[in-house]
Image (tube, rainbow, N blue to C red):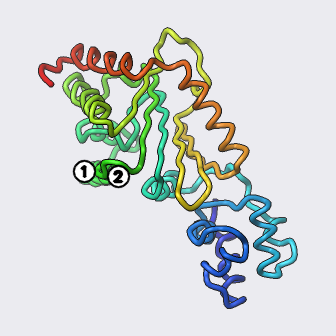
Amino acid sequence: MTSTYGDWLKQQREAAGLTQQRLADMTVMTRSHIAHIEAGRRIPSKEDARRLDKALNTGDVLSSFLPAEDVAVADYFEAARQLEQQAVMIREFALSFVPGILQTRAYARAVLGTSLPPVSEEECDRLVVTRLERARILDDPVTPVVWALLDEAVLRRAVGGREAMAEQVMHMARLAESGRLRIHVLPFSLGFHPLMENMLSLMWFDDQPPVAYSEGLRMGKLHDSPSVVMELQGRYDLAMSDALPLQESMALLRATAKEYGHRHD
């Protein structure tokens, strides 16, 4: 979404002489939620917008001119990337390749180096570093809690070659064995499942409502609507109920790494 709505909210708040915290107190919201709306990263619910209108004495402007809920973000992952760094729980679903926060350097280079138009070696290096920086949220041994639900295709597609895949699969297996990651696989034998259309990330926070982010070819959507987020959470839960249990998923990861030529633990 563009920041026009957020810019206008900020102007009205400042004209009323209110801090973000004061406005948050008046509207039963959190300061960070107000900040995200003003920055264009979040869309308030209709009830939030009504409370904002009341607090700022703006009639029904904020509730009447809410941006569309599911618009594509111009730099479509940036808002989700920022929220990812604040989340206390992340649940990923990957349809065809490993989620960004779980990628190894070799795997990330294979993904980011294959683009149209092509990127230079220098630009590819920059993109890889940025992606690996995202993974630093896993340096904390507890937060965020991360679950990964993988379609079996993620394991079978040899991105970067056999050596890179062996390293990548074992990286995920070790994260799971250490307790830092909970991982489950949706096997090919399952057939159709409720998440086959796109990749999906679900994020929860200490001080603001949960969000979902879905992505397809050249398109990403940050879902802020409570009803949409609830639907996507339901789809994730339904798919998870059909996935292999943790230990069976781990066994599949180890077997797959061995097939790719992994020689030792």
Disc 2 designates what residue?
Answer: 137
| Residue type beneath disc 2 | Ile
**Classed neighbour count for the residue bearing mark 2: other residues with Cα under 10 Å, few (<14), some (14–19), many (≥20):** some
Q: In which quadrant of the rendered image does the N terminus lie?
A: bottom right
User: Are the residues flagged by discs 1 and 2 in contact, CB closer than 8 Å?
Assistant: no
Residue drawn where x is 60% and y is 78% of the image: 21
Left or right: where does residue 75 sit relative to residue 153? right
Q: Residue furthest right?
A: 59
User: Which of 70 and 252 lies nearest the eye of the viewer?
Assistant: 252
Cα distance, mark 1 to mark 2? 20 Å
Q: Tell which tag, 1 or 2, sits nearer the viewer.
A: 2
Residue drawn where x is 23% and y is 37% of the image: 106
Could you tell me residue 227's position as x and y percent?
73, 44
Could you tell me residue 6's position as x and y percent?
65, 71
Disc 1 designates what residue?
Answer: 125
Left or right: where does residue 26 sit relative to residue 217? right
Picture quadrant of residue 104:
top left
Disc number for residue 105: none
Which comes before the other along the chain, label 1 or label 2? 1
Picture quadrant of residue 12:
bottom right
| Residue type beneath disc 1 | Asp
User: Which of 147 and 79 lies nearest the eye of the viewer?
Assistant: 147
Q: Secondary structure at mark 1?
A: helix
**Classed neighbour count for the residue bearing mark 1: other residues with Cα under 10 Å, few (<14), some (14–19), many (≥20):** some
Could you tell me residue 13's position as x and y percent?
69, 82
